[in-house]
Image (cartoon, rainbow, N blue to C red):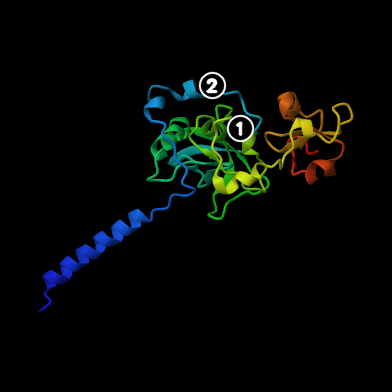
Amino acid sequence: MKITKKHVFSLLIIAIILIGAISIASAYTGTGFSHSIPSSKYYDLSASDILSKYANTDCHVEEKAICTKVVDGDTIYLDNGDKVRFVGVNTPERGVEGYITSKNFVQKLCLNKEVGIDIDDSKHTDRYGRILGVVIVGGKNVNEMLLKEGLAEIMYMPPSEFYPYDWANSNTHVASSHSSSSSSSHPTSSESTSSDSSASYIGNANSGKFHVPSCSSVGKMSENNKVFFSSRNDAINQGYVPCKRCNP
């Protein structure tokens, strides 16, 4: 059979369709985390309505910029050129159920607004060059909101300054490949190595930072999050990092 240009063109179209079908079938789904929360749940809520449900965070703003793009529920771009990956959490990937709702939630809180970033002091960036950190809007921890709303799962990947299990509730999902990470990298107050009265340093189990007792951050800290250390080395050996405000 004589092969004409028409045959070649037809074969080319078929090849393109097949490649597209294979790409869709093998699309990256991350951990496979999904949720069935409808976008309509937040349709009538303003950013202020959502923020009012949460207490102010103990995390500190180390960088401020305008969010110019929301890639998905756990990645945003800033007008200073930085790409930020929400540390400790993982939302559904494109094409997975829940992707739109998680992305829209972050858009409502962050897009075209000034956001603060508390950069992970233990690991500044991921392998893609994105900054790892807590995203802060109106003094509230957006990473925590995603977990408590059921829009994200815990993805704890030490070393990390932050311990996302402290942001979760009883219904929060944990990434299956990271479930073993729930062992206490940061001890709770019941695992303190020193008593309140003899402590030379006070750690925050929520942020993973430690402070001198006179630091202003200690006064804002929840009693349940306080961890007491008798020495600086004790705090560092248990994975805590020095506060940049009081420089313990």
**Reading the chain from its start, which is encountered first: label 1 or label 2?**
2
| Left or right placement of residue 91 versus residue 22 in this view | right
Of residue 81 and residue 42, the one placed in the foreground of this image is: 42
- The quarter of the picture where the N terminus appears is bottom left
Tell me how far mark 1 sits from mark 2, CA to CA.
Answer: 14 Å
Q: Secondary structure at mark 2?
A: loop
- The quarter of the picture where the C terminus appears is top right
Whether residue 68 is visible here, answered yes or no, is: yes
| Left or right placement of residue 162 versus residue 247 in this view | left
Q: Residue at x 33, y 54 (%)?
A: 24
Contact check, label 1 and label 2, Cβ < 8 Å = no
Q: Residues within 10 Å of mark 2 (few under 14, many from 20)?
A: few
Q: Is residue 12 above or below residue 176?
A: below
The three-letter amino acid code for the residue at tag 1 is Trp
The residue that disc 1 covers is: 167
Q: Tell me residue 71's x, y (percent).
A: 43, 44
The residue that disc 2 covers is: 53
The three-letter amino acid code for the residue at tag 2 is Lys
Q: Is residue 132 above or below residue 18?
A: above
Q: Tell me residue 161's x, y (percent).
A: 67, 42
Q: Nearer the viewer, mark 1 or mark 2?
A: 1
Dot label at residue 221: none
Q: Tell me residue 99's x, y (percent).
A: 41, 40
Q: Residue at x 46, y 39 (%)?
A: 73
Kindly indicate the quadrant of the structure image that contains residue 201: top right
Whether residue 142 is visible here, answered yes or no, is: no
Q: Secondary structure at mark 1?
A: helix
Q: Tell me residue 151's x, y (percent).
A: 48, 34
